[in-house]
Amino acid sequence: MSHLTVRSAYRDLADRINRFPQGAPPSDVLFAILKLLFSEREAGLVAELPLKPFTVADAAARWKVPEKEAQRVLDALADRAILLDTEHRDGRRTYVLPPPMAGFFEFSMMRVRDDLDQKLLAELFYQYLNVEEDFIRDLFGVGETRLGRVFVNEAAVPAELSLHVLDYERASEVAKTSRTIGVGVCYCRHKMQHVGKACEAPLDICMTFNSVASSLVRHGVARQIDEVECLDLLQQARDRHLVQFGENARERVSFICNCCGCCCEALVAARRFGFLHPVHTSNFVLEVDRAKCNGCGRCVDACPVEALALVSANDPKKPRKKTARLADDTCLGCGVCVSTCRDNGLRLTSRPERVITPVNSTHRVVLQAIERGTLQDLIFDNRALASHRAMAAILGVILRLGPVKRAMASRQMRSRYLEALIARTA
């Protein structure tokens, strides 16, 4: 293998990360993070990996090394949760480099480790995600399709609307239908703990599901739990007024975070950059009954995105009376505040328009790639051998899109082949 300087290896890795729809804007802090997580040699090797899932043989061919050597490197990276590996029923094993978030950034802090300086890593993460703005703006503010969505607090939904809560909108349904469930240390609060800013919310409550959970459990990053324990943890989170925020997909959800407003990057972004609408809301929105509101302020304190405020009730008989006022555009529809109200002055109601949730992670990634102008990287990943099956799956999603986004895809691709496929389905 050719010699790689520190500068070129980490810059090549940053370029590789940014070929995915959800990347990481280059900065000195990003390079410091990558240098902690990857050796110089690993950075150069990972920079050459394809975007789509790949086998040991694919990596060996790309790296021009024996398969035994490629296997050793890939397994070492999977042990550190930099790569995720999947064991298929036919005995094949494939690997994939996840995006930084939700991905190898979080996985690096989902367990206590002594093989790297987690305090230094946490300080760098804090600088990159909480002080600098480029990464968070890029992650939560570009395009219409978001990485994550809010799950409504099922107990907060009025009885007459409970039938309108679809299965995929329920965190409990994710727990009941997932093949594998893992729980690990909350990345956000673990990071904040190292910089002296953590709250008292539980740490061991970060949930992963299905193939992501299988990989993290297999490599000791997460602890495998069953449905009963998962449902219990979800209830504990609701009791602590935490927001349940998970992957923006209807099928095979890969993660659910139980988020506090002070530590969670998504909720912090919702407060700092609310005009960008960085978080997909639930299909519900809060309604305040001002006649019943006694102005206690519990709901204001509980709201993680500061969508509620106390204002004058304009009551001449009670000039000092306050009532809660809602900023509709900011409300997540999580229902956290409803359980804090002792006078039934708050209720959830259906949003005028339903929030559209992608079918699965492939659908979401393709939508994000179209919106961010990186679709060609997903389909023509010429840094490794392309998988016809993966390519067909991606094209299949494109062809099921609406006409406007299909036109966007066609313009970006500049491909007569894709234009012909789209024309046949019009």
Image: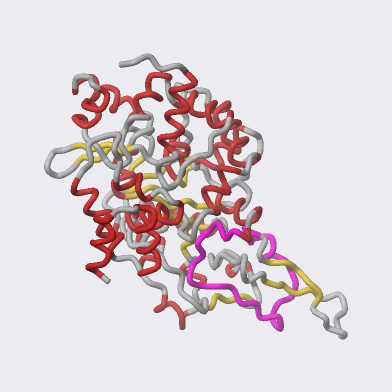
Stretch of the chain drawn in magenta: 276-305
- The chief SS type of the magenta part is loop
Report the side of 158 relative to 42 (left or right): right
In what quadrant of the picture does the N terminus appear?
A: top left
Q: Position of residue 138 (x, y in %)?
A: 54, 48
Residue 264 appears anywhere in the view: no
Between 244 and 398, the one lying in front of the other is 398
- Is residue 41 part of the magenta span, yes or no? no
Vertical position of residue 252 compared to residue 58: above or below:
below
Q: Residue at (30%, 37%) from the top-left corner?
A: 50
Q: Residue furthest left?
A: 90
Inspect this view and state whether residue 335 appears.
yes
Left or right: 46 with respect to 276? Answer: left
Q: Which quadrant would the C terminus be assigned to in this image?
A: bottom left
The foreground one among 327 and 300 is 327
Q: Quadrant of residue 45?
A: top left
Query: How many numbered tags mark residues here?
Result: 0
Where is residue 212? Give x, y as percent.
Answer: 33, 44
Inspect the magenta stretch and tell me whether residue 300 lies in it. yes
User: In x, y percent, where is residue 209?
Assistant: 34, 49
Q: Which residue is located at x 13 percent, y 38 percent?
A: 91
Q: Quadrant of residue 382?
A: top left
